[in-house]
Image (tube, helix red, strand yellow):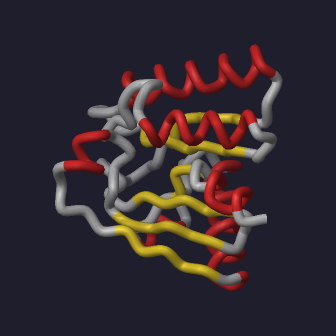
Amino acid sequence: MAVGSPQQPFVRATLAAARRGVVVRVLLSGAWYAREDNRKIVRWLNERADAEGFPLKAKLAEPRGYEKIHAKGVVVDERHVVVGSLNWNNHSARENPEVALVLHGAEAGAYYAKVFRVDWKEGGRRILIGRCGFVAVGVAGAICSRRGR
C-alpha cells in the first residue's frame, strides 16, 4: 500500500525529525500497486531534504520474489524498534485492525538496524528482514527518541 500524501501525519513527522537534525532513511515499497504513489513521496521527501539541507534520504525498495511486503518497521537510534502491519496512511492508522509491537533495547535495535542497513544498501533487492516477514520502512520514529534526551 502507498504511504499517502505529504500531508499524512507519519510523512510530516518524518520530515520534522529530519529538520531537527535526525538522520532519516526511508525505504518504501516499490510493489506495482504502490510504486507510483510511493515514488512521488520519495521524490517529494528528497526534494525537501535537498532544498532545505537536512539529513533525509528516501528510496523505493525493489524486492525480488515478493509480490508484497506486508510487515513494516521503524528503527530509532539502534535502541527502539516498531514492527507490525500498520501501513503509513490514514486509512490503515484509523480504520484497520493493525498490529504494532515496540521493542526497546540495544540487542533488538542493533539487529534491526543492521538488517535495515543491508536492505538500504541493496535497494530492497535482498530484503533480509523479509525472511521473517518484516521490512524496515525507515526511521521516521526518530521523533520519539530525540524528545527523551
145 lies left or right of 125: right
Q: Residue at x 43, y 26 (%)?
A: 7
Point out residue 59 in the picture as x, y percentages from the top left corner. Answer: 59, 34
Frontmost residue, 2 versus 125: 2
19 lies left or right of 138: right
Point out residue 40 in the picture as x, y percentages from the top left corner. Answer: 47, 20
Please identify the quarter of the rendering in which residue 84 is found.
bottom left
Point out residue 35 in the picture as x, y percentages from the top left corner. Answer: 38, 29
Q: Residue at x 50, y 36 (%)?
A: 11
Q: Residue at x 62, y 62 (%)?
A: 75
Q: Residue at x 59, y 43 (%)?
A: 26
Please determine whether, in this image, residue 132 is positioned above or below residue 33: below
Frontmost residue, 135 versus 64: 135
In the picture as drawn, the residue positioned furthest to the front comes out as 148
Please determine whether, in this image, residue 132 is positioned above or below residue 145: below
Please identify the quarter of the rendering in which residue 32 is found.
top left
Please determine whether, in this image, residue 117 is positioned above or below residue 55: below
Q: How many marks?
A: 0
Image quadrant where one finds the N terminus: top left
Image quadrant where one finds the C terminus: bottom right
81 lies left or right of 1: right
13 lies left or right of 89: right
